[in-house]
Image (cartoon, rainbow, N blue to C red):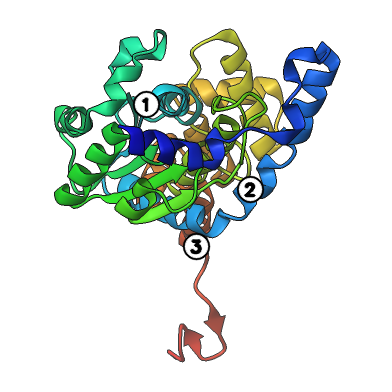
Amino acid sequence: MYREMVDLEKMSTEMRNAETMALDEMTPLEIITIMNQEDEHVAGVVKRELPRIAQAIEWTTKSLQCGGRIIYIGAGTSGRLGILDASECPPTFGVSYDCVVGIIAGGKEAFIKAAEGAEDNSGLGRDDLIHINLTSKDTVIGIAASGRTPYVLGALDYAKKTGCRTVAIVCNENMEMSRAADIGIELLTGPEILTGSTRLKAGTAEKMVLNMISTASMVGIGKVYENLMVDVQQTNEKLVCRAENIVMEAVECSREEARKALKEAGGEAKLAITRMLLNCNIAKARKLLEDAQGKIRQAVINGKKETEQPIISKQGVEGGQK
């Protein structure tokens, strides 16, 4: 135990920040000014890891394309961030709640009330993945600022044995989780203004990476046309209006035309857009989308090819018939 405490002190996320040694004497403006200054470094930290983040996204996209899932698993703040990102995917992209899954040490109750002791049990990480019927089609992303959480290490170990691709998102260098995963994304945010409080810069960096992974993966499986969320779920008045706006932007039509198109398409903005862009019926638009794996741009290209007339030359049709 003593050795583990010494190792903890060596982590950059546990070190004291020289700029905030008098934090308890600062005014509110001084405190938030230094917080703002520290946060300015976070984007640069994430930028250095973009190649590894992109590789992780290739894997998560492939998982979704073959019927697998993105699985976030972590403890404390890291676990909560995974659940937050996962929970926002269904309303934003129209996927099921089984598509992107967030798991936290200690179970759902730990999202609100901390269950810090749960993170020390590697067997629980394994058991939680067994409980969701993990398969080799899934991609498992372990998240922990320290990079050494037993709960997450247990999960990564089980995931690799299952045949999953594995990713670790950590905020310290060359830690156990980075070595245990196929890819280690190391966000070296350094000492927090409040020593050891990794819900601050470390948490911000983790959230930025999760935003990238989920958003880019959804782009990859056709949930976006241009920069529009064309599978948005109309679960409230704001989102009903957003769906209309999306159709209006995509096809440059009036709100009344957008409403009519959405009604004809059963509320599916993607289907309405495809039908209007190709000026075809709903059944044809749906078939084209299915053949294009849900990607509007490809569906439109394929639809236009189907309507092209054969080239007629002086010698006849398509190559010289007389």
| Mark 3 or mark 1: whose residue is earlier in sequence | 1
Q: Quadrant of residue 105?
A: top left
* Position of 185 relative to 70 (above/below): below
Q: Give residue 54's position: percent from left, percent from top.
A: 50, 55
Tell whether 213 sits left or right of 15: left
Q: Residue type at mark 2: give it.
A: Val
Q: Could you tell me which residue is drawn at 58 percent across and 9 percent down?
A: 237
Q: Quadrant of residue 15?
A: top right
Task: Please indicate, yes or no, whether residue 72 appears anywhere in the rendered image.
Answer: no
Disc number for residue 75: 1
Judge by depth and name the residue closer to the eye, 60 or 205.
205
Q: Give residue 160's position: percent from left, percent from top.
A: 21, 50
Judge by depth and name the residue closer to the eye, 233 or 188.
188
What kind of element bears circle 1? loop
**Quarter holding the N terminus?**
top left
Q: Residue type at mark 1: give it.
A: Ala
Front: mark 3 or 1: 1
Q: Which residue is mark 2?
A: 45
Question: Disc 3 and disc 2: Cα gap in Å?
Answer: 45 Å
Rate crowding at label 2 as few (under 14), some (14 to 19) or many (20 or more) other CA atoms within 10 Å.
some
Q: Could you tell me which residue is drawn at 34 percent across and 48 percent down?
A: 176
Q: Which residue is mark 3?
A: 305
* Position of 58 relative to 109 (above/below): below
Rate crowding at label 3 as few (under 14), some (14 to 19) or many (20 or more) other CA atoms within 10 Å.
few
Q: Residue type at mark 3: give it.
A: Lys
| Mark 3 or mark 2: whose residue is earlier in sequence | 2
